[in-house]
Amino acid sequence: MAAHLRIAVDASGPSAVVTVGGDLDYPMADTLGRTIDELLGTGPAAVVVDLAGLTFIDSTGLSVLVHAWRKGIESGTPVRLRGQPPFVAAILDITGISELFARQVSRATADPGSATA
């Protein structure tokens, strides 16, 4: 039985936190994508996507994460991932998506005055 996607947003601090739970799949991927796009438009210091509650992710879910990373780069607002369950971390490593997010952090660390810091 599929676990419906749950999204909670906390934009009360300098960084917005999006907590995701359930299944991030084709029927629900656009919902998360729109949520992240809207947050990026508000200019937070960063958008943190907490994946700890995910029970499933498919290729459209992965695509949303890549899209969020790209939009973050374009807007100058870093998008960071945290709390990946082991199965999600493995998928992100195999697909190279974790490397995208790692490079973004490395760039911000290397240049503290950059827009992605």
Image (spheres, rainbow, N blue to C red):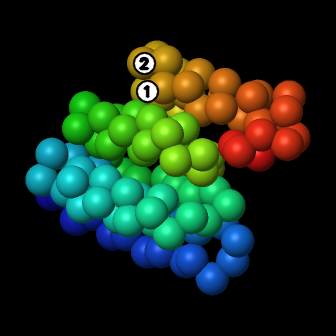
Q: Is residue 95 above or below residue 81?
A: above
Quadrant in the picture for residue 91: top left
User: Dot 1: few (<14), some (14–19), or many (≥20) neighbours within 10 Å?
Assistant: some
Q: From the image, tell me which residue sits under label 1.
A: 91
The label shown at residue 95 is 2
* Amino acid type for the residue under numbered disc 2: Thr
Return the residue nearer the eye: 116 or 25: 116
Quadrant of image for the N terminus? bottom left
Q: Is residue 20 visible?
A: no
Position in image of residue 92 (x %, y %): 48, 28
Whole-Å distance between the Cαs marked 2 and 1?
6 Å
Q: At 49% from the left edge and 40% from the top edge, which residue is drawn?
A: 74
Residue for point 33% across, 42% down: 64
Residue 27 rendering spot, x and y as whole percentages:
12, 53
Tag 2 near tag 1, CB within 8 Å: yes
Is residue 64 visible in this depiction of the protein? yes
> Tag 1: residue type?
Ile
**Residue shown at 38% from the left, 65% from the top:** 38
